[in-house]
């Protein structure tokens, strides 16, 4: 996910090794390996991040979830605003 940091779309990224992902499809349980990405960013950049990831990982895109940050230390918050793209 270096490209997201380089493009200033994320401040940092945590990229998992392959996780075992399970889901139900057509009344059958299906399991496969999946990458999970978590990063700190601005809500307004989420659509742009999703577009970039979908273009880069056409065959097997990683899971992407938006989780709101309820509280962030003021120093971290200033750093996020300073080091990510202006939305």
Image (spheres, grey):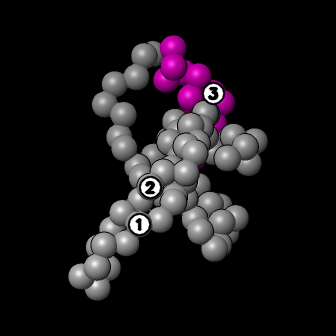
In this view of the protein, can residue 6 be seen by the observer?
yes
Q: Which mark is residue 82?
A: 3
Q: Give the CA separation, mark 2 to mark 1.
A: 7 Å
Say which label, 2 or 1, has the lower sequence index: 2
Measured as percent of width and height from the top left, residue 68 is found at: 35, 40
Q: Residue at x 70, y 64 (%)?
A: 56
Q: Which residue is mark 1?
A: 31
Q: Secondary structure at mark 1?
A: strand
The magenta region covers: 75-87
Q: Position of residue 83 (x, y in %)?
A: 66, 30
Which residue occupies 55% across, 43% down?
Answer: 16
Residue lying furthest left: 27
Q: In the rendered image, which residue does mark 2 sit on? A: 20
Above or below residue 19? Residue 21 is below
Q: Which of pointers 3 and 2 lies earlier in the amino acid sequence?
A: 2
Is residue 81 part of the magenta span, yes or no?
yes
């Amino acid at each position: 996910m270096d490209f997201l940091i380089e493009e200033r779309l994320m401040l940092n990224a945590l990229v998992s090794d392959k996780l075992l992902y399970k889901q139900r499809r057509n009344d059958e349980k299906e399991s496969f390996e999946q990458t999970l990405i978590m990063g700190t960013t601005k809500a307004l950049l989420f659509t742009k991040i999703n577009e970039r990831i979908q273009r880069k990982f056409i065959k097997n895109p990683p899971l992407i979830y938006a989780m709101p940050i309820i509280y962030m230390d003021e120093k971290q918050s200033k750093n996020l605003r300073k080091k990510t793209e202006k939305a």
